[in-house]
């Protein structure tokens, strides 16, 4: 009975003269290590609005809202910290690698959701024939840049490329909208479904 | 003797299908009337450890898998029984393995598989007043 | 004789495993135990059928806060078993390191809680202080103190660099000396001996009947450990041994857990030796999961975790069966609690480590008159602590 008491007593004395083990959190800042998985954040420069992060998110913490108003079609990605499990899947699957990144912020207490829900807005391009979504403008430009000269093979984008290269139109593009989809709409920006109709289906069979 | 040979010898013609899709994993399909006999051979005579049972709702039938572990060989042996789609019923193993009571109760309330001769077949995970005939894990 | 029924639980849903026990008592002695569960049933097996294979890893991670690495490892083992693939060597070592660190911190957590139940709050404070640097290490290696998100089908998601290895070694060295002292304190203390020896004994037959696993089985002399029996990750490359004890009482369960901590430290140190100053692949990319079925196991801190998955070639499993170790360990209460007093029930239940710390509401009522006496869990813990005090005086 004697021996353990001495051992414990020694530890007790040591504890008495050492400073408290706990940190004074709100008064004192906590420094988290490198690579800490905190709250994710969208970055304007990197994000192209492809919604890859929303698709891989296990807890559906990234909400995608699409506004199909023809005058100003937009897509809004909103991150909801209340659902977020900080798993870093969004950052790992980001196609540019710079669009969404985890910060070191661990303290996300709030009074109202609007304080922490953080979003990014992108302009989207609509199909000239059916009005469906083709993709975010920035996303398409990003893909074109990656493809380089190969993107000339995509007839929809020829007009844009010609403009961006600042050369006079090599192929004059006519923008005629037909009631039913026809072959010369090949130069208009179309959604995958309409493009399939333009390229593959016979002009005489209408959808 | 190697375990797969030993199993085949002991179970004899009760084995309908013997599969070894991966190293140390054995699946044996048997008839549902032979379940108690096979389980007794594996659990008592061959001294395996009961792991768990899992019910599966297939398109055309129900399936019960009884997993046993042979710890000396590190092998998992699963007994596979197919049950009728309309009236899934199978013999309970409670008399053999007391610990299996809970998973049988769980499978009963989630899949509606009835375990014959289980004396305590009442709700375990779901509340007492859960509507009868509503089996949440069945596929729609 | 009047029989008293004592309902234990269900408890605070914030915690891990709210459970409900009905103790049939004869005076102070427990005659029978009934178990009712499902208060925290979240339908994870069903949700899993709606998620992508890669997303399920994060779902199963959230089954339990303490074993948040065990379920993903077992799930990844199951899917890798289905695919028939092997993972890179470095990934195996990293999986082993994280699994063993988890075991260390959980065993320490258990020791602290057991001390609290017995009225040894000093032990509780000490042990939780020792555990803290481990959690800081976890934060450094994985990015979070819990829910590590390290496992991916085909490997691990993060690498460990040499600086982190150095820091981890230092922490482990201090932990080893601290754990040595703790083990001595527990083993010598006469009061602890009086409270724990021959309390809640489980025989080998009980273990076989209920299929109990992990430290509970090993304390009763049943020599099973998935890490050795069906090696996965790096356990077959490393020198370590399985700890077993013969008596099967709560004291032996405590001893098994404390000695396992030393084994874990040994395993981690060996793993660190093998991966230090080396580089290598950590992930075998998996593109598609073919139809088939797979079984994965992992020796979690509480025992064997069992996952069964079945694929039909689509992007999510069609059946995912999960068996956590407590599912088979908890029913052993039917054997271990009978004949014991109510004040011992707390520590017997805690001996299995079902994360029972969360129970806070208990009401006692007379079976005959249905008259309710409200007794809180705190009161049961207090009863247990008073018994220790009495023993200390005598």
Image: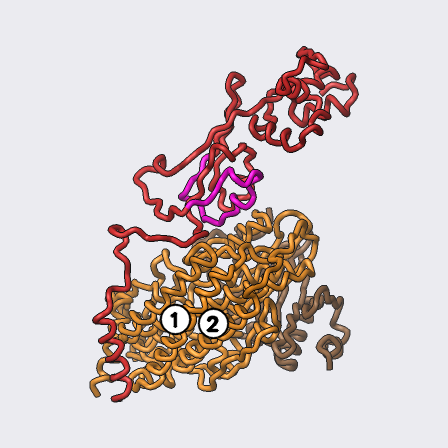
Residue in the image at 42% along x and 48% along y: A38
Question: Which tag is nearer the camera, tag 1 or tag 2?
Answer: 1
For label 1, the residue is: C108
The prevailing secondary structure element of the residues shown in magenta is loop
Q: Residues within 10 Å of mark 1 (few under 14, many from 20)?
A: many
Relative to B112, does residue C200 appear above or below in the rendering? below
Q: Which chain shows up in orange?
A: C
Give the percent coordinates (x, y) of residue A27.
24, 51
Taking the image as shown, residue C69 lies to the left or right of residue A164, namely left
Give the percent coordinates (x, y) of residue B26.
69, 69
Q: Is residue A95 magenta?
A: yes
Q: Quadrant of residue C280?
A: bottom right
Give me the chain letter of mark 1: C
Chain B tint as drawn: brown
For label 2, the residue is: C329
Span shown in magenta: A78-103
Residue in the image at 25% along x and 64% along y: A20
Chain A tint as drawn: red
Q: Give the mark nearest the N terminus, 1 or 2.
A: 1
- The answer to whether the residues at label 1 and label 2 have Cβ atoms under 8 Å apart is no
Of residues C202 and A186, the one nearer the viewer is A186
Relative to A153, does residue C182 appear above or below in the rendering? below
Q: Is residue A19 magenta?
A: no
Relative to A58, does residue A179 appear above or below in the rendering? above
Indicate the quadrant containing the N terminus of chain C: top left, top right, bottom left or bottom right. Answer: bottom left
């Amino acid at each position: 009975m004697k021996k353990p008491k001495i051992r414990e007593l020694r530890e007790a004395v040591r504890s008495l003269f050492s400073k408290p083990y706990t940190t004074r959190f709100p008064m004192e800042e906590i420094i988290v290590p490198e690579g800490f998985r905190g709250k994710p954040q969208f970055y304007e420069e990197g994000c192209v609005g492809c919604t890859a992060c929303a698709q891989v998110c296990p807890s559906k913490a990234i909400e995608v809202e699409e506004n199909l108003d023809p005058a100003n079609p937009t897509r809004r990605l909103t991150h909801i910290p209340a659902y977020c499990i900080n798993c870093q899947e969004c950052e790992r699957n980001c196609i540019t690698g710079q669009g969404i990144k985890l910060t070191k912020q661990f303290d996300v207490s709030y009074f109202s959701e609007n304080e922490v829900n953080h979003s990014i807005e992108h302009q989207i391009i609509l199909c000239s024939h059916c009005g469906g979504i083709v993709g975010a403008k920035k996303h398409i430009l990003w893909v074109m840049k990656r493809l380089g000269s190969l993107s000339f093979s995509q007839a929809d984008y020829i007009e844009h490329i010609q403009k961006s290269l600042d050369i006079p139109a090599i192929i004059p593009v006519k923008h005629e909208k037909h009631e039913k989809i026809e072959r010369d709409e090949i130069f208009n920006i179309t959604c995958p479904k309409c493009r399939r109709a333009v390229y593959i289906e016979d002009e005489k069979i209408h959808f | 003797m190697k375990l797969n040979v030993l199993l085949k010898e002991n179970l004899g013609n009760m084995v309908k299908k013997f599969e070894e899709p991966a190293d140390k994993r054995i699946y044996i399909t048997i008839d549902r009337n032979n379940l108690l006999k096979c389980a007794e051979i594996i659990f008592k005579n061959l001294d395996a450890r009961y792991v768990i049972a899992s019910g599966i709702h297939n398109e055309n039938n129900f399936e019960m898998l009884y997993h046993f572990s042979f710890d000396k060989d590190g092998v998992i042996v699963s007994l596979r029984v197919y049950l009728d789609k309309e009236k899934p019923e199978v013999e309970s193993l409670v008399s053999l393995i007391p610990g299996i009571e809970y998973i049988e109760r769980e499978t009963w309330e989630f899949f509606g598989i009835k375990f014959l001769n289980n004396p305590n077949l009442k709700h375990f995970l779901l509340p007492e007043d859960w509507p009868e005939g509503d089996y949440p894990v069945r596929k729609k | 004789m009047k029989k008293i029924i004592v309902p234990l639980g269900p408890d605070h849903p914030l915690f891990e495993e709210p459970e409900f026990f009905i103790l049939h008592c004869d005076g102070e002695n427990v005659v029978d135990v009934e178990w009712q569960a499902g208060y925290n049933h979240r339908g994870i097996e069903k949700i899993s059928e709606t998620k992508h294979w890669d997303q399920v890893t994060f779902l199963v991670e959230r089954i339990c806060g303490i074993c948040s690495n065990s379920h993903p490892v077992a799930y990844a083992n199951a899917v890798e078993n289905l695919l028939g693939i092997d993972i890179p060597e470095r990934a195996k070592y990293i999986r082993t390191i994280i699994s063993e660190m988890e075991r260390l911190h959980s065993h320490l957590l258990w020791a602290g809680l057991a001390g609290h139940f017995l009225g040894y709050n000093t032990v509780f404070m000490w042990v939780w202080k020792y555990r803290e640097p481990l959690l800081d290490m976890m934060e450094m290696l994985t990015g979070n103190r819990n829910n590590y998100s390290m496992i991916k089908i085909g490997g691990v998601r993060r690498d460990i660099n040499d600086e982190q290895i150095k820091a981890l070694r230092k922490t482990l060295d201090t932990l080893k000396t601290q754990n040595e002292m703790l083990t001595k304190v527990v083993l010598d203390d006469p009061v602890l001996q009086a409270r724990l020896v021959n309390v809640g004994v489980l025989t080998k037959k009980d273990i076989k009947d209920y299929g109990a696993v992990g430290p509970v089985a090993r304390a009763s002399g049943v020599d099973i450990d998935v890490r050795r029996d069906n090696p996965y990750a790096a356990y077959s490359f490393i020198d370590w041994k399985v700890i077993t004890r013969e008596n099967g009482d709560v004291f032996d369960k405590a001893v098994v857990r404390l000695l396992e901590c030393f084994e874990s430290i040994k395993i981690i140190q060996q793993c660190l030796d093998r991966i230090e100053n080396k580089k290598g692949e950590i992930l075998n990319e998996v593109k598609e999961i073919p139809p088939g079925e797979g079984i994965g196991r992992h020796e979690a801190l509480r025992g064997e975790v069992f996952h069964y998955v079945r694929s039909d070639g689509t992007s999510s499993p069609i059946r995912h069966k999960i068996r956590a170790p407590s599912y088979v360990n908890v029913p052993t209460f039917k054997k271990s609690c009978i004949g014991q007093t109510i004040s011992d029930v707390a520590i017997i239940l805690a001996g299995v480590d079902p994360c029972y710390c969360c129970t806070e509401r208990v009401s006692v009522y007379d079976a005959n008159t249905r008259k309710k006496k409200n007794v809180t869990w705190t009161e049961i813990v207090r009863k247990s602590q008073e018994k220790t005090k009495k023993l200390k005086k005598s």
